[in-house]
Image (cartoon, helix red, strand yellow):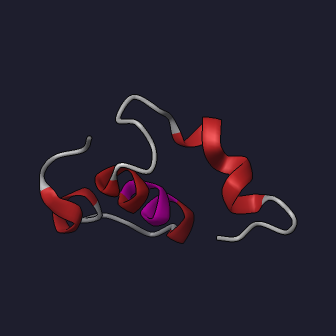
Amino acid sequence: MVTGGLRNVLADWTDYDRAGFSLAKILGVFPGGRSFGSVKWMFWGDGSPL
């Protein structure tokens, strides 16, 4: 799980997909070791619930 709080993680944020990914990691949706590239399809796929 990511530590430091959402505000610190997103201090230099510009991309809403990465913001959603960081939030999902903080909430425990994605394991801490998972990379954005491994779940990018969830944010860009057709019919995605996100």
Horizontally, residue 50 falls left or right of residue 35, namely right
| Picture layout, residue 14 above or below residue 32 | below
Horizontally, residue 2 falls left or right of residue 48, namely left
What residue is drawn where x is 37% and y is 66%?
13
| Picture layout, residue 34 above or below residue 27 | above
The image quadrant that residue 30 belongs to is: top left
Q: Is residue 12 magenta?
A: no
What residue is drawn where x is 35% and y is 49%?
28
Horizontally, residue 14 falls left or right of residue 44, namely left
What type of secondary structure mainly makes up the magenta span? helix
Screen quadrant of the N terminus: top left
Q: Is residue 21 magenta?
A: yes
Residue 24 picture location, percent across and down: 42, 57
Magenta residues, as a range?
A: 18-22
Residue 8 picture location, percent across and down: 17, 61
Screen quadrant of the C terminus: bottom right
What residue is drawn where x is 44% and y is 51%?
29
| Nearer the observer, 1 or 5 | 1
Number of on-image labels: 0
| Picture layout, residue 11 above or below residue 38 | below
| Nearer the observer, 9 or 47 | 47
Residue 40 picture location, percent across and down: 66, 48
Farthest residue, direction top: 33
Farthest residue, direction left: 4
Horizontally, residue 26 falls left or right of residue 43, namely left
What residue is drawn where x is 47% and y is 65%?
20
Residue 7 picture location, percent across and down: 19, 68
